[in-house]
Amino acid sequence: MILTEGLFTFLLTLYLFTALQALGNKRRGLSFLSGAVLGMASLVRPSAALFPLAVLGYFLVDPQVPRKEILKKTALTLLAMALVMSPWWVRNYREFHRFVPFSTESGWIFLQGTYPYQEFGKHHREIRASWPVGRDELETNELRFALGMKRAAAWLKNDFSSFWRHYLIEKPKHLWNYTYTGTFGRIPREDIDKFHRWLLRLALAGILLSMFLGPRLYSGPLAMVLLYFTAVHAVFLAIPRFALPATPVIFVFAAYLAVKAIGFLTGLPKRAMGF
């Protein structure tokens, strides 16, 4: 199995860079470029496709943002994204004789997310062997998604509190509380996880600080990326590997806090601090 985290991390970071450049620039070509990059990212991971709408939702409730201009840039982004993805759509229509917008891998991811972590960890081979298999990959995806919906509905009905604890607490915690990495030299894995958790705390403090000190035109969309990541994987499957592509955003907010703290303690002007 080929993991896509490396490629998706690159494309997501490139998209965020071009999108933030477009927000602070009147050149609409940057919005088109960011949409093209987002289209490529969506071919790798379909979860990226709704990033513009998630960010747009933030902008619509923030009074400091020029909404008319944001709507125009969002439309250009979605247009470019559609153009990049159109060959994939044509291929799927010829193959399956219907419109299939994204890759057909969400079924097993959603289904696996309906199992408690301990249960799946102990019996993952038996569980996966029991999953339905269709005549082709599209039918297999649909069957597994339907089974996941059935399992989730039964869980919600039979154990309401356990269901919500799994989706609202355990999944986000499992997504962010650990690192998907090996050891660095002789550094124990436990120490790496401790550093990771401290980095998350610094990033959270950086997010809160940026909401007050701004500019929210940039910090708001980046914070929405983390919130969107958490929400999507809480619905589907939350494992540390899936959080890896959002790590650059974590470093940005942690660095923002560090720069602000150094500036406050040293009294250096903003220009000397690099902004």
Image (tube, rainbow, N blue to C red):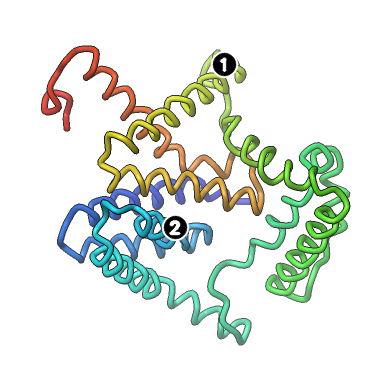
Vertical comparison of 139 with 204: above or below = below
* Closest to the observer, 113 or 66: 66
* Residue type for callout 1: Asp
Residue 85 location, quadrant: bottom left
Residue under the point 40% across and 47% down:
10
Residue 118 appears left or right of 222: right
On the image, the x and y values in percent for residue 229 come to 52, 48
* Closest to the observer, 150 or 6: 150
Give the class, few, some or many, for how many residues have Cα within 10 Å of label 1's Cα (few <14, many ≥20): few
Q: Residue placed farthest to the front in the image? A: 63
On the image, the x and y values in percent for residue 272 come to 12, 23
* Closest to the observer, 31 or 164: 164
Label 1 SS? helix
On the image, the x and y values in percent for residue 156 come to 80, 54
Residue 67 appears left or right of 42: left
Vertical comparison of 12 with 172: above or below = below
**What is the distance, in whole Å, between disc 2 and disc 1 at their CAs?**
34 Å
Residue 274 appears left or right of 33: left
Residue under the point 30% across and 53% down:
63
Label 2 SS? helix
Q: Quadrant of the C terminus?
A: top left
On the image, the x and y values in percent for residue 173 come to 63, 35
The residue beneath circle 2 is 54
Residue 191's mark? 1
Residue 3's mark? none
